[in-house]
Image (cartoon, rainbow, N blue to C red):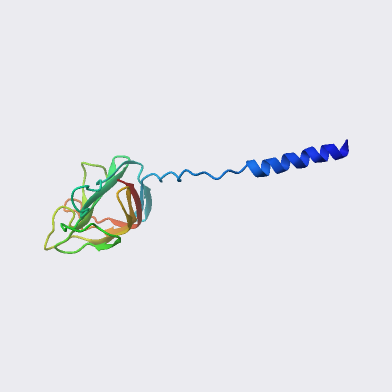
Amino acid sequence: MVISLRYFLLTGVVILLLTGCKKSDSPAPAPSSYMRFKLNGVQVTCDNNFYATPKSTTTADANISFNARWGNKSLDMKLFTYLTNDIAPGSYTFATLKQYGAEIYPDGSPGPVYVAGSPNAPAAVITGSGQITITEINAQYLKGTFDFVTGANINTGLTMTVTNGEFYMRR
């Protein structure tokens, strides 16, 4: 009786080991979009209204806008190269005559906007400084990091500092 009980117990353990773990042929689900950063030293995690320009199927992927919100507050970023080549992984430093930039609405929109770079048109003079780094980009998503300091808002006289920014945006 003791031998048969041990036999059944051992057989049950072997069956569990052989069938308990199953390799899935399905690919892992794609992560959800996220954008997080520190705004003047305070951690912010966006939680709604994620958007990234879809990959063009007829022209180069040379102009990308992406944004996200936390509550009614928002952060909008743009990389417009106006070239016939796709935007590729690399760093895009805000500079004159480049349409690389960010706009942040820390009090919600409408509200005071704080600008770094030149997000709305290439300009001879930019406000603030910063960069967006694309680490991965394809038709499904873009991923990267960012940091910037805005110029002073004309109405408030304040600047905003954004550090440790990271994003993954589905397209």
Q: Is residue 171 above or below residue 127?
A: above
Percent across and percent down for residue 3 are 86, 40
Percent across and percent down for residue 152 are 20, 57
Q: Is residue 123 above or below residue 23?
A: below
74 and 1: which is toward the camera: 1
17 and 109: which is toward the camera: 17
Percent across and percent down for residue 68 are 30, 45
Q: Can residue 104 be seen by looking at this rendering?
A: no
Q: Residue furthest top?
A: 1
- Image-based side of 26 in relation to 3, left or right: left
Locate the C terminus and report the quarter of the image it occupies: top left
Percent across and percent down for residue 145 are 34, 57
> Residue 62 falls in which quadrant of the image?
bottom left
> Residue 73 falls in which quadrant of the image?
top left
Q: Residue at x 68, y 41 (%)?
A: 16
Count of numbered badges drawn on the protein? 0
Q: Can residue 156 be seen by looking at this rendering?
A: yes
Locate the N terminus and report the quarter of the image it occupies: top right
Q: Is residue 86 above or below residue 109?
A: below
Q: Residue at x 21, y 49 (%)?
A: 113
113 and 85: which is toward the camera: 85
Q: Residue at x 40, y 45 (%)?
A: 30
Q: Residue furthest left?
A: 124
